[in-house]
Amino acid sequence: MSARITQIRYWLAAFGVGLVWLLPEPVLAQAQTQTQIRREIVPDAWQGDVQRPRPDMKGVETLRFVTDSDYPPFHYYDEVGALTGFNVDLAKAICETLEVRCEVRDVEWSELLPSLDRGEADAAIASIRITAEALNKADFTSRYYATPARFVARKDVELRDIRPETVEGVKIGVVKGTGHEAYLKKFFPDAAIATFDTAEDAQKALMGDAVDFIFGDGIGLTFWINGVTSEDCCEFRGGPYLDVKFFGEGVGIAVKRGNRRLSEILNYGLEQVHASGRYEELFLRYFPMSFF
């Protein structure tokens, strides 16, 4: 457990992101009263739509969720060995609003969707992207957060107006074989695109002045920019970019294929968590910085 504690302490120091006790309650309360916060910080699909009626909950007394345990702050073990994180707390909030018992346990990432097929869990809530590949293996709720793409530049790079014509010849790093690379090639064809095997390699290239910008997943880049490994070198420029074709529909809760009833129940639960303000509260506690 000591290694786990060290890892979590490093994460807290590196990201400085908002576990419940890190964000002062007066600040949180003030933020929740500002409608602009929802538009700028909370990247969710729900915008106050007409709410569906409560579904038939007959026979549903417990919801069994599975998640991963190695993706802080979304899901991880804390210093006392408790499974926690944004996804874990969101699952519990859904159960609370549905008035059912809640079980959340961790499994290996590769076992998330198979555990649904085997009937060992009802739903998987682990920041699973809604992609064509994933939809071949499971059904999903509506997304509960988006996955925007972003440009990041070193702070000494003067270019701020990011358009296809302004980045002609500009060196932009991106992870090869990704939707981000495909997007750059289609919409920024005159940029000098450099591909890398991993996001970490692209980040190092940016810090080392090998490229002027990098383009990638806004959530991962948020953590990097606000973490210690970036050495406060860089910042977002332009965007965000939310193109379903290239970056997916976002992240949803997975259920066994064909289980439409459960996906409708969970969608209702998500809507109620949004409507009550609980979603925004959780989001602001775990992510006081903006993905946008």
Image (cartoon, helix red, strand yellow):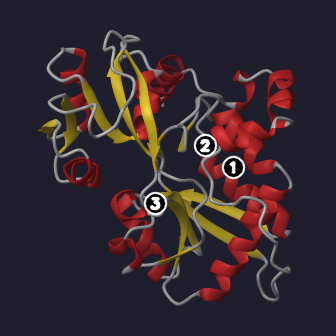
| Rendered image quadrant of residue 7 | top left
Q: What residue sits right under mark 3 in the picture?
A: 128
Marks 3 and 1: in contact by CB < 8 Å? no
Q: Amino acid at mark 2?
A: Gly
In the rendering, which numbered label is found on residue 89? 1
Q: Is residue 81 left or right of residue 35?
A: left
Q: Say if residue 97 shows up in the picture.
A: yes
As measured in the structure, the alpha-carbon distance from the residue carrying label 3 to the one carrying label 2 is: 15 Å
Residue drawn at (81%, 22%) of the image: 27
Residue drawn at (64%, 69%) of the image: 64
Say which label, 1 or 3, has the lower sequence index: 1
Give the structural element (helix, strand or loop) at label 1. helix
Q: Along the line of sight, which residue is nearer the eye, 6 or 215?
A: 215
In the rendering, which numbered label is found on residue 85? 2
Q: Is residue 284 above or below residue 138?
A: above
For the residue carrying disc 1, how many other residues have a C-alpha within 10 Å: few (<14), some (14-19), or many (20+)? some
Say which label, 3 or 2, has the lower sequence index: 2
Q: Is residue 288 above or below residue 273?
A: above
